Image: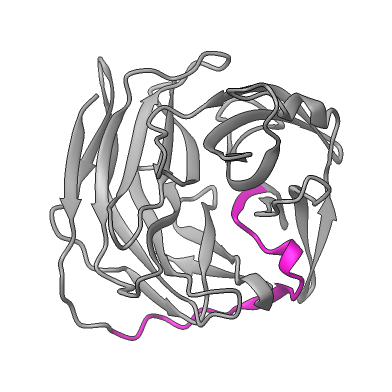
Amino acid sequence: MSIIPLLLAASFTLTSPPALEWSQVTTNAKETISGIVHWETNRFLVVHDNKEEKDVKLSFLQSSGSSWKLSPLTLSDPKKLTFGAQGTSELRDLEGVTLIPGRTGEVLVIGNKGSEDGWIYDLKITGNTAEVVDAFRAPGAYPDSDFESIQAFSIDQRLILVWADRGTARRPATIWAANLTLGVKPVDPVALTVKTPWPTEKDYRAIADLRVSPSGEIYVSSVSDPGDNGPFDSAIYLVGRLERSSKGPILVPNSVQLPVSIVPGYKIEAMDFDSTGRQLVFATDDEALGASIAWYQK
């Protein structure tokens, strides 16, 4: 395992970003969005950071004119989510989701199970039902880690899994990457540590979500999270590139990087590229204030 440190510029001048047109999805704290993927035209699959066993964990998000509708998914066998290190820990919440290139209707989600973070589930989606195909704990998990991001990516028809610990004001975030073979836990990951310069609050998280563009650029959302009622802030950074050698993935850092977008007033915990790679959808987990959605043009 190799680790590459990345410390971004400590000071910079904030500039006004292009205005984002935000649309309110919900005002319900149980329907906020912690991960998102494009599913069909005008339809997304989203995951929710809900900690109670009875709470909805996944939904379809459908646009209808200027409004949005959330349709909950059912887990076909929730008991499959109960095995862990002690065999008894329950799924607590979901933090991120990714499509699997080449696998129709199949996704990977990352979340927490009991007191254990960094559990990755392979889910097969049929209609409004999600079936657990496999589960494993992400390499790199340690007592203070908190994983919120995941993406499966294809380079030269080889699958690579990318995931990230969010970091805190006291320690940097870490991006991990490893070759991915479905049904087999990834091994020998490479890692890149990231500490972004803004937001600067003590409740700062360097990586609330992560997305790799079709050309391999690695974008992250950094956020402040002072509590259920905010105020929240977000910044989007291009922190490096994902490449591949004959031995596996390579994480190439940007030595200095300013934010590509500053987004005050929202906590962006979910991002996804459209098929062109030129547009990012942003979705928020604004806690008691609900969730909103917007599009960012590169």
* Residue visible at 55% across and 30% down in the picture: 101
Q: Position of residue 252 (x, y in %)?
A: 21, 40
- Quadrant where the image shows the C terminus: bottom left
Give the quadrant of the N terminus.
top left
x, y (%) of residue 141? 42, 34
Residue 67 lies within the magenta run? no
Spot occupied by residue 228 in the image (x, y as percentages of width and height): 60, 74
Q: Describe residue 121's horizontal placement relative to residue 202 as left or right.
A: right
Asked if the stretch drawn in magenta spans residue 31, the answer is: yes
For residue 206, what is the image quadrant?
bottom left
Q: Which residues are magenta?
A: 15-38
Residue 213 is at least partly visible in this image: no
Q: Quadrant of residue 123?
A: top right
Up the image or down, 41 lies above or below 237; here it is: above
User: Does residue 19 appear to the left or right of 27 in the view shown?
Assistant: left
**Most extreme residue toward the bottom, as rendered?**
16
Vertical side of 63 occupied by 100: above or below: above
Towards the viewer: 88 or 190? 88
Q: Residue 54 at x, y = what percent? A: 84, 48
